[in-house]
Image (cartoon, rainbow, N blue to C red):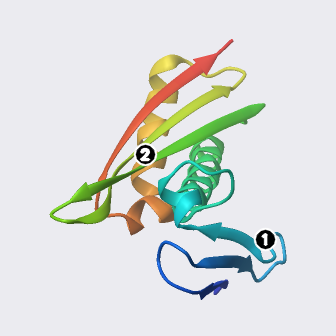
Amino acid sequence: MSIEKTGSAVWQGGLKDGKGSVSTQSGVLQEVPYSFAKRFEGEAGSNPEELIGAAHASCYSMALSMILGEAGLTAERIATEAKVALEEVDGGFAITRIHLSTVASIPGADQAAFQDAAEKAKAGCPVSKLFNVEISLDARLEG
């Protein structure tokens, strides 16, 4: 099975004074603006790192759900945040690490089984496999 999805971006102007927009095939994002100020100076708006974080958090949550299901467990709720670090490295910028933080409510799950599933999801999530950076995880079971 092979699935292809498309994201696109348009950029106009120089690095610091230019502006761009990002869109997705589904139309969920449609010409969402991004810029140097939004990415590096804290101006409100979108940037590549938050989009990567959203993609990673959603993929991880789905992977965790799958692994729990294989163990006969169903989560009532999995809430995941992916914190993506963009840092200056060797005169340029690089994504240096991603920290996943997840909180789940899973009836019948014990802490050991949950931690095992959480680690397997971190390693097995297709988006995790994409990155060549340290990916750390805090996983907390509620209830």
What residue appears at the point 58 percent right and 55 percent down from the top-left corner? 50
Residue annotated with mark 1? 29
Please name the amino acid that badge 1 sits on.
Answer: Leu
Q: Can residue 86 be seen in the rendering of this structure?
A: yes
Label 1 environment density (alpha carbons within 10 Å; few <14, some 14–19, many ≥20): some
Label 1 sits on a secondary structure element that is loop
For the residue labelled by badge 2, is the local secondary structure a helix, a strand or a loop? helix
Foreground of the two, 73 or 132: 132
Q: Position of residue 137 (x, y in %)?
A: 41, 35
Residue at position x 44%, y 56% in the image? 124
Of the pair 139 and 8, the residue shown nearer to us: 8
Residue drawn where x is 66% and y is 44% of the image? 69
91 left or right of 33 in image: left
The residue lying toward the viewer, choosing from 92 and 77, is: 92
- The quarter in which the N terminus is drawn is bottom right
| Residue 139 percent location from the top left of the image | 50, 28
Q: Residues within 10 Å of mark 2 (few under 14, many from 20)?
A: some
108 relative to 96 in the view: left or right: right
Number of numbered discs overlaid on the protein picture: 2
Label of residue 120 in the image? 2
Q: CA distance from mark 1 to mark 2?
A: 30 Å
